[in-house]
Amino acid sequence: MGTIKACIFDLDGVVVDTAKYHYKAWKKLGAELGFDFTLEDNERLKGVSRMDSLNILLEIGKITLTQDEKEFYADKKNNWYKAFIEQMQPDEVLPGAEAFFKAIKNDGYKMALGSASKNAVPILEKTNLLHWFDAVIDGTKTQTAKPNPEVFLLGAKALGFTPAECVVFEDAEAGVEAAINAGMKCVGIGSPKLLAKANLVIEGLHQMTLDKLKHI
Ligand code: G6P
Ligand code: MG
């Protein structure tokens, strides 16, 4: 084993395809507030916390709300989102994720989750993935949002490794920046243009191999 000893995975868009459910719920909220929320707008919400996402949505709809109203609508969106994830099946795990987990575990690497979501544990339970993770750092354990490195630093600490021993897997620009700010290597999942700061960009975990991990 080389320098890298652990992998820290973002959840939404890396391990599971939940972005579509976030989008559906935000779109429903936009409609209720009287405006259209597009798929393009949704890109801005990837990796962004629930309240920050609501603020972006309101900016797009040119709507001003009080803090109490914001809490009300953020809750409303989350309840719709929870109803979607309640129906999730293990086959909604993204291609290649479990094969890669198996490969790294067999090779002695440790694994942590590093997600902004407060719904991460129920999602991992629904999809039968929780057992893979040696540590789970989610939105219930962090004070600051990506690109702040807090979530990944807590992940490394929970696993007992230094940042230089960890690689982060991220699909959001803010997430790639958080990994860099943490002093970790990063594999971007998605657009090479958007995620240009990552050490390596792949389309999905199905393209990831132990060999790529060792040479990052
Ligand atoms: C992830 C997703 C975001 C989501 C955030 C908070 O970072 O990419 O779209 O807003 O988690 O999720 P939550 O489940 O706590 O609302
Ligand atoms: Mg993500």
Image: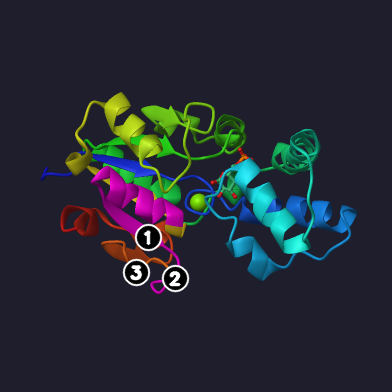
From the viewer's perspective, is residue 194 above or below residue 111?
below
Mark 3 lies within 8 Å of ligand 2 (Cβ measured)? no
Give yes or no for contact between labels 2 and 3 (Cβ–Cβ under 8 Å): no
Residue receiving disc 1: 188
Q: Where is the N terminus found, in terms of image quarters?
A: top left
Q: Residues within 10 Å of mark 2 (few under 14, many from 20)?
A: some
Residue 35 x, y percent position in the rendering: 84, 63
From the viewer's perspective, is residue 148 above or below residue 63?
above
Question: What is the tally of numbered marks visible in this picture?
Answer: 3
Residue 2 x, y percent position in the rendering: 10, 45
Give yes or no for contact between labels 1 and 2 (Cβ–Cβ under 8 Å): yes
| Residue type, mark 1 in image | Gly
Instruction: Say whether residue 22 is left or right of residue 135.
Output: right
Q: Where is the C terminus found, in terms of image quarters?
A: bottom left
Under tag 1, what secondary structure?
strand
Quarter of image, res 151 = top left
Return the residue found at the far bottom.
193
Quarter of image, res 24 = bottom right
Q: Which is closer to the viewer, label 2 or label 3?
A: 3
